[in-house]
């Protein structure tokens, strides 16, 4: 049975809450948002490389590496001081970081920052209920291209589609919204409703590892204060079409049809703050207010033969005791297709056809770690690779209220 095993705690720990950790996509480093600084740690020695200071007057809430910034790393940071900072590494002294530019416009704390796949657009969101989109038009030069104010509550998270200029946002208003540009204006093209409380984070499915014959492109995962993780997909047979009227874009509450494909097993006992989708194993990890790390995987069953299971990895599901608890709580496990009495979750809603015939797709818990940061809540989770026992391995990175950033592996 797979297990989540501790690998290391990054040293020294943050002196206050660790809000967010962003692994660089190409380099063995990770940036952590804390107090009024960014901390850059090594994923080979698990020690501090740099402390980035001087830009924010209050705690840094979020950070994101610019795609393609391997030779000259660039990182964006969002702070409780309502500002967004852009930093570049000093090429003469790798420990130093230059505060390149500050982006101002939000009226309250910035909760999340995210670069588009091409690295030309930066999305930011705030407690002021708005989403801003900035375009890099030159060196250290950004322009505001959109201010989106459709959400009715704090906007907690933004995430870009891995291939398209399609932005997802999650909010205190319980909704997930999708945004596109059309006729030189950005607008909401779909509202994903189903959560019954604050949606804390959204995460796109990596293109790597997408299941065979998957329609609609990468899916979107969302996690919420309601204790659920939901997976959304674009309805079949749709292509993005330009709408002719800019006015219809601004006022749009639709334009693309997305639907809830599945809910993951309800394993957390309190709010889920963060969800991460692995590019390597294609597993999903989640963390939250209960201090647990949960790892899930998707698997397929041939329609009509629920005993024959085809997993996406070589691991086995959780043990019988956990499965029994899962079923008693009204959540379908492997081989359980019908909805339970009392409002259980049907995890067999997703059906696909392959060369071997139709399949139903399910999710199951494969590993769990309780009290991962002692009694503290866990604010963020991410997948990455790190040098563990002399070899590069897939790892989980968690950031907690205790100020610690921890490295874990699943084996």
Image (cartoon, helix red, strand yellow):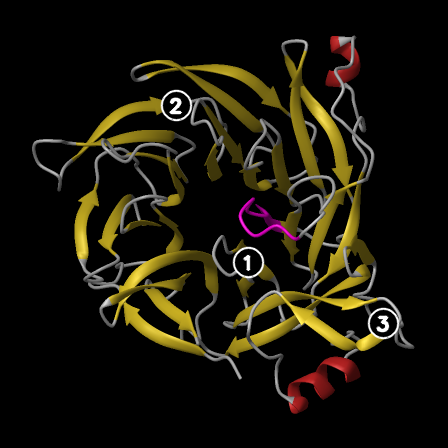
Above or below — where is 42 with respect to 37? below
Farthest residue to the front: give it. Answer: 355
Above or below — where is 230 with respect to 67? below
Q: Secondary structure at mark 1?
A: loop
Q: Position of residue 384 (x, y in %)?
A: 39, 56
- Closer to the eye: label 3 or 2: 3
Seen in the image, is 102 located left or right of residue 221?
left
Residue 102: name its quadrant. Answer: top left
Q: Secondary structure at mark 2?
A: strand
Task: Give the crowd class for mark 3: few <14, some 14-19, many >=20 residues within 10 Å.
Answer: some
Which residue is denoted by mark 2 in the rendering?
103
Q: Position of residue 38 (x, y in %)?
A: 28, 45
Name which residue lies at 54% across and 55% down: 277
Q: CA distance from mark 1 to mark 3?
A: 23 Å
304 or 268: nearer the eye?
A: 304
Q: Position of residue 256 (x, y in %)?
A: 78, 30
Name which residue lies at 39% across and 35% down: 81
Confirm whether residue 17 shows in the render.
no
Q: CA distance from mark 3 to mark 2?
A: 50 Å
The quadrant the C terminus occupies is bottom left
Residue span colored magenta: 200-211
Q: CA distance from mark 1 to mark 2?
A: 34 Å
Which residue is denoted by mark 1 in the rendering?
282
Name which residue lies at 74% across and 24% down: 240
On residue 337, the disc is 3
On residue 58, the disc is none
Q: Mark 3 or mark 2, which has the lower sequence index?
A: 2
Seen in the image, is 297 located left or right of residue 118?
right
């Amino acid at each position: 049975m797979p297990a989540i095993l501790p690998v290391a705690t990054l040293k020294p720990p943050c002196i206050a809450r660790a809000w967010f950790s962003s692994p660089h996509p190409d380099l063995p480093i990770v940036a952590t948002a804390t107090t009024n600084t960014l901390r850059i740690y090594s994923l080979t020695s698990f020690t501090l490389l740099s402390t980035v200071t001087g830009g924010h007057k209050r705690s840094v809430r979020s950070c994101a590496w610019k795609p393609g910034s391997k030779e000259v790393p660039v990182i964006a940071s969002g702070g409780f001081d309502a500002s967004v900072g852009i930093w570049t590494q000093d090429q003469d002294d790798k420990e130093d970081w230059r505060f390149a530019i500050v982006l101002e416009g939000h009226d309250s704390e910035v909760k999340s920052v995210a670069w588009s796949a091409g690295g030309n657009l930066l999305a930011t969101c705030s407690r002021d209920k708005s989403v801003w989109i900035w375009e890099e038009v030159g060196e250290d030069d950004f322009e505001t291209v959109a201010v989106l104010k459709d959400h009715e509550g704090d906007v907690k998270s933004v995430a870009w589609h891995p291939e398209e200029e399609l932005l997802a946002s999650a909010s205190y208003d319980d909704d997930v919204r999708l945004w596109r540009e059309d006729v030189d204006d950005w607008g909401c093209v779909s509202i994903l409703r189903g959560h019954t409380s604050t949606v804390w984070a959204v995460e796109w499915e990596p293109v790597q590892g997408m299941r065979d014959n998957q329609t609609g492109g990468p899916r979107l995962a969302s996690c919420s204060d309601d204790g659920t993780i939901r997976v959304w997909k674009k309805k079949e047979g749709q292509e993005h079409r330009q709408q002719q009227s800019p006015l219809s874009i601004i006022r749009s509450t639709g334009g693309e049809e997305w639907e809830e494909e599945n809910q993951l097993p309800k394993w957390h006992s309190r709010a889920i703050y963060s969800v991460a989708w692995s590019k390597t194993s294609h597993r999903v990890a989640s963390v939250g207010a209960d201090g647990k790390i949960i790892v899930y995987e998707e698997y397929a069953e041939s329609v009509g033969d629920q005993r024959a299971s085809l997993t996406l990895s070589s691991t086995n599901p959780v043990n019988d005791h956990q499965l029994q608890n899962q079923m008693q709580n009204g959540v379908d496990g492997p081989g359980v297709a019908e909805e339970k009495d009392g409002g259980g979750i049907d995890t067999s809603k997703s059906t696909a056809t392959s060369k071997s015939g139709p399949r139903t797709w399910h999710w199951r818990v494969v590993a769990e770690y309780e009290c991962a940061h002692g009694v503290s809540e866990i604010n963020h989770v991410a997948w990455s690779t790190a040098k563990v026992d002399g070899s590069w391995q897939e790892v989980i990175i968690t950031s907690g209220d205790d100020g610690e950033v921890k490295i874990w592996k699943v084996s």
